[in-house]
Image: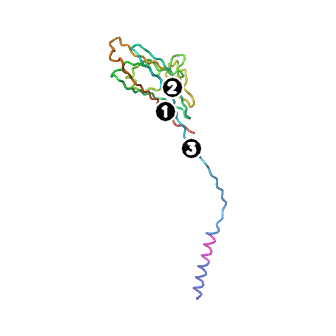
Amino acid sequence: MSIKQKLAMGILTGGLAISMIGGGTYAYFNDVETSTNTFAAGTLDLAVNPETIINVGNIKPGDWMYRNFKLENNGTLDISKVLLTTEFTESVAGFGDHIVVEFLINEDKSSLLGPSNVIDSMTLTQLANMTEDAVKNESPKWFGWQGGENSGLKAGSKDNLHVMFRFKDNKDDQNAYQGANLELKWSFDAKQTAGSAK
């Protein structure tokens, strides 16, 4: 082997040794910590107690029926509103015009100044075209002050509601409604409150 070849071989061997030292013996301090995190969604769980608010037969024009029921928030999240929608089926057309909801009052939202009326004297036909908030404080305000609970339904709480139905006596011939029946469906749709910083 010539001196040039020996020199080239020595440089190559030295370069390889330096690269191995640099790549294989790098040392440093190290500390690793682990963060374990969870996301758990809350629940909306609205109950109507009792589930059947009214079941009455053998009624005639002029009769009225008073009932009460509760809206219960059995979930873990507050409810901002409970939207009431009305649907019904009638065996005789027009019977829904003769069944009137005289009032639907939320007792918990009422104040000394007056009741919190969700509904004031409307026929089922009129109500079928509306959506009302059953847990909104509708009681009158006095100089900016309003009594009763705030609107909405907090988790673990309940509102007491009172309703009166009436078979309207129109002082006219209502023979067409003898033997008629009507099936009323009230749906209570709970809505969450707005998102907030947690």
Give the residue type that dot 2 points to.
Pro
Q: Main secondary structure of the magenta part?
A: helix
Helix, strand or loop under label 2: loop
Picture residue at 64% right of the left edge, 53% below the top? 33
Residue 50, label in figure: 2
Residue 39, label in figure: 3
Q: Which residue is mark 1?
A: 191
Picture residue at 62% right of the left edge, 75% below the top? 17
- Tell me the CA gap for discs 3 and 2: 34 Å
* Quarter in which the C terminus is drawn: top right
Residue range corresponding to the magenta coloring: 14-22
Ranked by sequence position, the earlier of labels 1 and 2 is 2
Q: Residues within 10 Å of mark 1 (few under 14, many from 20)?
A: some
Of tags 1 and 2, the one toward the viewer is: 2
Give the residue type that dot 1 points to.
Lys
Please provide percent x and percent y for residue 85.
Answer: 42, 28
Give the residue type that dot 3 points to.
Phe
